[in-house]
Image: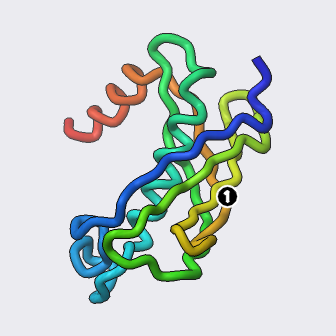
Amino acid sequence: MDMINAEYTLEWLVTEDKIAANVGSGDVNVFATPMMIALMEGAAVQCLKPFLEEGQTSVGASISTSHVAATPIGMKVSATAKIVAVDGKKIDLAVSAFDEAGIIGEGTHTRFIVDKERFEQRAATKMK
């Protein structure tokens, strides 16, 4: 199955728990940049799911994005992730976010396809 150009859009409602003043990224009552990034990553995760084999997942490796417009509480926001390049287990995506008034951010995101159990076991070795 060809992954290039596959895309997925995820939508949220901006609620109190998603504003900058409540997530520690500022003191304003608007959609927080870290939450916009989480929405973008969530869209990327869902975009890749149909291409994963049993036991696989994807993990974020990098994201570079702008956040160019504020979104108030009560407005819907959406993020779209589109696969633009595949290099083995490395997947590059274009990400963009919108509110009901227009674009609020865009950028690039890289994820890697990994064996979920092995990845979690490797992380757990840090506790030893």
Furthest-bottom residue in this view: 27
Is the residue 9 above or below the residue 21 in the image?
Answer: above
Q: What residue is shown at x 69% (from left), y 45% (from top)?
A: 82
Q: In this view, does 59 lie to the left or right of 63?
A: left
Report x, y in % for residue 109.
62, 53
Q: Mark 1 points at which residue?
A: 108
Q: What residue is shown at x 54% (from left), y 26% (from top)?
A: 49
Is the residue 65 above or below the residue 87 in the image?
Answer: below
Q: What residue is shown at x 58% (from left), y 59% (from top)?
A: 63
Q: Which amino acid does label 1 sit on?
A: Thr
Camera-nearest residue between 32 and 57: 32
Is the residue 100 above or below the residue 116 in the image?
Answer: below
Q: In which quarter of the image is residue 34?
A: bottom left
Display coloring: rainbow
Q: In which quarter of the image is residue 69?
A: bottom right
Is the residue 115 above or below the residue 86 in the image?
Answer: above
Report x, y in % for residue 24.
26, 77
Quadrant into which the C terminus falls: top left
Q: Residues within 10 Å of mark 1 (few under 14, many from 20)?
A: some
Camera-nearest residue between 45 and 98: 98
Quadrant into which the N terminus falls: top right
What element does badge 1 sit on? Answer: strand
Camera-nearest residue between 116 and 84: 84
